[in-house]
Image: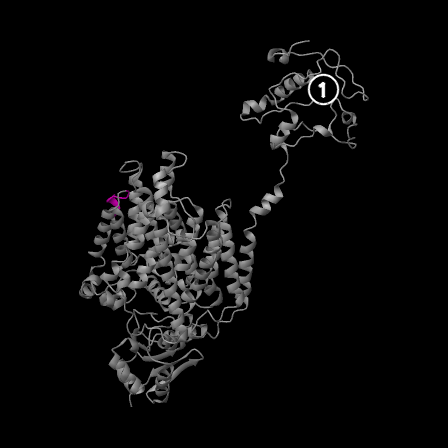
Amino acid sequence: MRPPATPRERSAPEPAPGPQTPDAPDRVAPGLSATPPPSDQPPPSAAREFSDEPTRADDEPTGVNKPAHVDEPETSEAARTSQESVTATSQEASARPVRVTARAHRPPAREPAGFVAGPPVTDLSDLAPAAWPARVAAAWPAVPLIVALSLWVHAMRHTDVSALDDFGLVSALHPAFWAGLAVLTAGFWCTVRHPRRGGGWPLAYVLGLLVMERATQAVLYPAPLYAWAWKHDAVVDHLLTSGGLQSADQLGDMAVYDQWPGFFAAQAALVRLLGVDNAAMYMAWWPLASSVMLLLPLLLIYRTFTEDRRLIWTAVWLFCVGNWVGQDYFSPQSVAFALHLGVLAVVLRRYGRSGGRDGRPGQAVWTVLLSVLLIAIVVSHQLTPGMLVVTLVALAFTRRHRHWVPVVTSVAIFLAWCLTAALPFLSAAMPEMIRSIGDVGANVETGYGATPTGTGAVATSWAARLLSASVLLLALAGVLRQRVLRHRALPLLLVAAAPLPMLVASSYGSEMIFRVLLFMLPGAAFFAAAALLPEVRTLAAAADAAARGKDGRSPDVSARRRRLRPPSLPPLRYGAWVPLPVLLAGTLAFVPSYSGKDRVNYFPPREVALVQQLFDQAPDDSLVVAANRNYPLAYERYWRVDHYWFLDDDRRHVEEIVRDPAAVLARDMGAVEAPARAYFLLTQGQVANSEMNGQLDEAQLRRVRESVAGSPRFERVAENSAGVLYVLGPAS
C-alpha cells in the first residue's frame, strides 16, 4: 500500500482521473487510493458552515474545475494578482481526486440568446448591493420630520390671531400645531438615541424645532412683536438720520444707546446694504436668525467634552426649549449672547492645558480672534461683558484652563470702554449701582407694573418658572448621577454656576434674574441632558481608558462606581420611556412660556397705522402722552419729539390722574408751546400691558378715555378699533 502523500507530494501535479460512468458513482479512478489524502483544508461542509459566502457547488457540474477558496484582497497588489492565484489554484484542484455523483451530470442551464458572460465573481464586493433597504432605513427619520412640518404648515393656515386673550398665542393655536410638536419630539428622540444615525438628522430636527417655535410668530403676525424691538428700530433710524453719535445733552436718557452703539451701527449698515426702509422690514424674523446663530458655538462647547452624539444633541434640544426668556428678539443682547458663547468656545477649546503644555501652536491667532469677539461684545451691550468676565475668572481657577490671557484681555477691553465712551452713563448710574450691591431681595423683585395679573398671565408665568426649575433640577440630577461628568466636564459646571453672583450685584431694571437664567442655560442644559441618558463618557475619560488598557477601569474604581451609583430603573427601560416624556413636556411647556404674553407683545396693523399717523403730523418739539410705552413706534423720532408715560410716574400722581383724568392730563400737557402740539394716545397694546402687569385695570383705563373724550380741551384726531388719538387744544 502506498503511504500517504506528504505536503510536498500533494503540491505536485498528479495525473487527471479517468472517465467516470454514471452507474458507478463511488468508483475511484485507477491508480488512486480509495482513501482521500490528508489535507490542511477543512471539508467542504465545514467550510460552508463557517463561511458567510454563499456556495453553489450543488448547482454546477463537477466536471468544471472550480477555484478553491480565495481570501479577500487586502492590498492593491493582491488585487492585481488575484487572477493568477485563481489559475494556480484551479490547476492544483484538477489534480485532486474527484467524487462524481449523479447530480454532477445535470446539464448546465441554457443562456438566452445574446447573453454575454461577464468576468468571474471572486469577491462579494463585486456583487451589486441591495441598496434600497439600507437607503430606506437611513431615510426613515425624514418621515416624522416631514409629518411634523406638514402639521405646522396646516396649523399656520388655520390659526386666527385677530382676538388674543390672556393666554396669548397658546389658546389661538390650531391643535395641529401641538400634534406637530409631539411628532417632532418623538422623531428626534428615536433618531438621536439610535447609535447608527448620522449627525445630519439631529441637526435637521433641531432646525425644525426652531422653525416651529421661533418662526410661528413671524408667520402669523403681520407686524413685528415687542415694543423694545420697535424701540431699537428707532435707534437704528436715528443713526441713519443723524449720521453719528450724540451726547446726553442732545438725547437725554436715550443717549445710553449711543454709548454702546455696536449692534445699532451694524444694523444701520445692514439696512443700507439690503436697501430697505428700516429694520422693521426684517426684525420679525430676528428670533429665528439669532437662535440659529447660537448653534455653532454651542456645538463647539459641548464637543469639547464629549463625542457622545446623544448627549450633545439632547443638550442642544433642551437649550432651545429652555431658552424662553425672550432675549432672542431684535436686540443687542441676542448678538452679544452669541458672541459670549463664541468666546467660551475659543477659551475652552484653545486655551486648555493638554499633556502638560501651557499653550498650543498658533495661540497668537486665537488671541487676536478672542480680542475681536470681546471688542464686539463690549461696544454692543452693558451686561454681557460683566457676565463674561465672571465666567472666565471661574474657568481660570481650574487646573486645565488656568490660562490668564483671556481674563486679562477681557478685563482690559472692558475697562477701556467703560472709562472712555461709556463714562458719562456710568458716572450718572454708579451711585444707584453701588446701592443695589448686596440687596438680593430688591434685585430679584419685579416691582410695580411687572406683576402678572389675571388667569392667563399667572398661568403662563408659572409655566415659565416650572420650565426653568425643571431644567435646573435635571441638571442637578445629571451632576449627581453622572460621576464622570462632575470631574471631566467641570468647566461646564462652572459656566452654569458663574452667573449666580450677579444677583448680588445689580437688579438691572428688575431683569437680572432672567438674564442669570439665560447665561446659566448652556451649562445647565448639558447636565440636564446627561440626567436623561444612560452612562456617558467624555473625551478625557475615553483617552484615559485607552491609556490604561482595553477595559479602561481598574477593579477598585469599578466597584466604587457601583457602590456610589444611585438606584435607577434598568438601562433599557430607562432609556426607552423616561427621556421622551420629559423632552415632550419641556417642548410643549416652551410655547406658553415664550408666547403666553403675546396679547401684550403683538400690535395689529391698525395700531401701527394709528401711531404712524401721529408722527406723520406731529411738529418738532411736540409731546406725546400715553399710559405706558407698550405700543409700536413708541420712540419714533425721539430726538425731535418728547414722550411722557404717566404710569411710569410716581404712584400718587397716577392715582390723581385716575380721579380726574382730563383735568390733570391737560395740566401736565399745557406747557407745550406752539407750533409744537401735545397729543394723548391710548391703544390696545397699552391697555393689555396695564391689565396683565397689575397697573390699571380695563375699567380705570376706560374712565380715563371717556373723561378725555368728554373734555372740551381735547380734540379727537384719529380713531380705529386699535386705539384713539387726541390733541390738546388751546386754553379758553
- Please tell me in which quadrant of the rendered image residue 77 appears: top right
Depth order, front residue of 635/650: 650
Residue occupied by mark 1: 98
Tell me if 61 is positioned left or right of 722 in this view.
right
Give the camera-side residue of 612 and 62.
Answer: 62
State whether residue 565 is above or below residue 679.
above
Q: Position of residue 519 (x, y in %)?
A: 32, 57
Residue 274 is one of the magenta-drawn residues: no
In which quarter of the view is residue 731 placed?
bottom left
Residue 429 appears in which quarter of the rendering? bottom left
Going by the numbered disc 1, the residue's amino acid type is Val
Q: Residue pushed farthest front?
A: 1
Residue 332 visible in the picture? no
The magenta stretch is: 400-406
Residue 344 lies, in percent from the top left, at 32, 49
Image quarter in which the N terminus is found: top right
Answer yes or no: is residue 293 visible: yes
Quadrant location, the C terminus: bottom left
